Image (cartoon, helix red, strand yellow):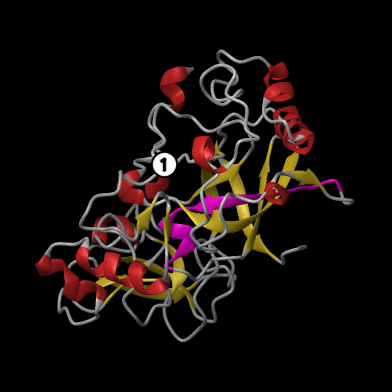
Amino acid sequence: MLQSVSYILLAFVACDAAKPWREGKTFISAENYESWIKNRTRAEDRAKFLNKTQGGCCSWDGQNCGQTTDYCNDPTHCVQDCQGQWIGGGGGDITCGDKCAHNTDGKCNGCDDCRWCWPTGSSSSDPNADCQCGGGGPSPSPSGQASTTRYWDCNQPFCEPGNLPYPHQYRPFRMSDGRIFAHAAASDAILQGHAACEKCYQLQYSGSTFVVKVDNWCPCDSNPPGCCEPHFDIAVPGMDYEAVTQSNVCYQSDKSIRMDKGRQSCAHWPWEDGDDCCNSVSTDQSLNDACNLFISTGWDNPRVGFQEVTCPY
């Protein structure tokens, strides 16, 4: 079981002197984020983010180059893995044919011009072909299948810089309609720069339904392979896996988190920590209750169906 979660890196690489503004998963300001997006790439790749290349780029709205990672800004991954649309020239461009039966087929999810599209130079029977926006309509809202993990690093969320330590009221709780409300970090394919900040997504698996509000970022380059596809890292008290996290500031910023085992109480659930691990997550009983609620679903990093929904809070 340990191997099944060992690939998940729930944090950025450690800060260095060249990037004093970088803190864990978060950035102190939007300007710092824009600077990171531009400077993290090789010089010859920067033009892709500025929409000045003849070679094309990955777009979230079908018209402009999107702010994303090197992984998604590759024609091989943009459409197939990151649910973007390749625009602006050569290799990786798409050719679209007949309209699909419904504007929610495939990757369209409501766009006005939902067509059967395939990589240019291939054919309509290409295995990567799918229904997607052919242009002339709004960008599709992400939906489909996503991977999941869980974390609780006490750090400030990417979408809410300065909110440190991570608010206890962001713990999971059950709503009156039976669904569980929680917060989550999202991958590039979902977050799309800042576009999905504070948006909500419904996740469904094995009879349980979560509604998560996106307030944090799980970047592909620091979290392969999970965050290189549609992915939600759900904030669950007591479940930060410290063997791979580099943004956990609970020791410094939230003394209520108990470290009786030298780590968070449920960091090794379910392969080593039993279900009773939630009873010693925190001196704040509400966090223990939230952990117990999550464990009651049996969600051990499942793949889930997801769709954007109206935020209930």
Q: Looking at the image, is 100 positioned above or below residue 301?
A: below
Provide residue 228's location: percent of width, then percent of height. Answer: 37, 48
Query: Which quadrant of the structure image shows residue 10?
Result: top left
Q: Is residue 192 magenta?
A: yes
Read off the magenta span: 178-193
In this rendering, would 271 be left or right of 53? right
User: Quick one: 47 or 104, which is closer to the camera?
Assistant: 47
Can you see residue 243? yes
In this rendering, would 33 be left or right of 249? left
Image point (40%, 49%), residue name: 24
Image point (17%, 75%), residue name: 47
Provide residue 111's location: percent of width, then percent of height. Answer: 54, 77
Residue wearing tag 1:
226
| Number of residue marks | 1
Query: Which quadrant of the structure image shows residue 59?
Result: bottom left
Provide residue 209's location: percent of width, then percent of height. Answer: 73, 45
Q: Looking at the image, is 302 positioned above or below residue 142?
A: above
Q: Is residue 153 magenta?
A: no
Furthest toward the bottom, the residue is: 136
State the SS at label 1: helix
User: Quick one: 205 or 257, which is closer to the camera?
Assistant: 257
Image point (36%, 61%), residue name: 79
Furthest toward the right, the residue is: 176
Provide residue 76's location: percent of width, then percent of height. Answer: 26, 56
Q: Looking at the image, is 82 positioned above or below residue 272?
A: below
Image point (68%, 45%), residue name: 204
Q: Which amino acid is tagged 1? A: Gly
